[in-house]
Amino acid sequence: MSTYAFNIHYIYKAAAKAITITSNDDEMPVYQAALRLIELHQAGAENSLAMPSADASPEEIMQLAESHGIHDIHVTRR
């Protein structure tokens, strides 16, 4: 199984950020990148509302990311 790397550029609380994430999938939709970014930035959150539910739609994930200050997400495969 191949592993793919993705560069993710985004804004977090008014600061430009970039991260490289690996995945077994050859594509990474923006909402999946948003989910990974929420996990990254909310890892220590004690509030379970900080994370989307398991059945959250892509739109709900994007709205939650926005509420956490994560937006303007751009994904490119390396």
Image: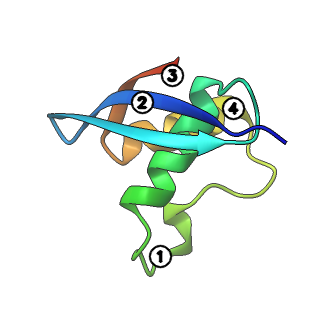
Using the rendered view, name the quadrant where residue 2 is placed: top right
The front one of 27 and 10 is 27
Q: Which residue is mark 1?
A: 47
The image quadrant where one finds the N terminus is top right
C-alpha distance separating marks 4 and 1:
21 Å
| Image coordinates for residue 49, horizontal then vertical, percent | 54, 65
Q: Are marks 3 and 4 in contact (CB under 8 Å)?
A: no
- Mark 3 residue type: Arg
User: Which quadrant of the structure image shows residue 18?
Assistant: top left
Q: Nearer the viewer, mark 3 or mark 2?
A: 3
- Quick one: label 1, few (<14), some, or many (20+) residues within 10 Å? few
Disc ID at residue 58:
4
**Amino acid, disc 2:** Ile
As measured in the structure, the alpha-carbon distance from the residue carrying label 1 to the one carrying label 2 is: 26 Å
> What is the distance, in whole Å, between disc 2 and disc 4 at their CAs?
17 Å
Helix, strand or loop for disc 3: loop
The amino acid on which the numbered mark 1 sits, given as a three-letter code, is Asn
Q: Earlier in the sequence, mark 4 or mark 1?
A: 1
Against 55, residue 76 (above or below) is above
Q: CA distance from mark 3 to mark 2?
A: 10 Å
| Percent coordinates x, y for residue 27 in the rendering | 70, 23
Report which residue position mark 3 lands on. 78
In the image, taking residue 5 as reference, residue 37 lies left or right, namely: left
Q: Answer yes or no: do the residues labelled 1 and 2 have beta carbons within 8 Å?
A: no
Which of discs 2 and 4 lies nearer the camera? The answer is 2
* Element assignment for label 2: strand
Amino acid type at circle 4 is Pro
- Which residue corresponds to mark 2? 8
Closer-to-camera residue (66/24): 24
Please say if 14 is above or below 38: above
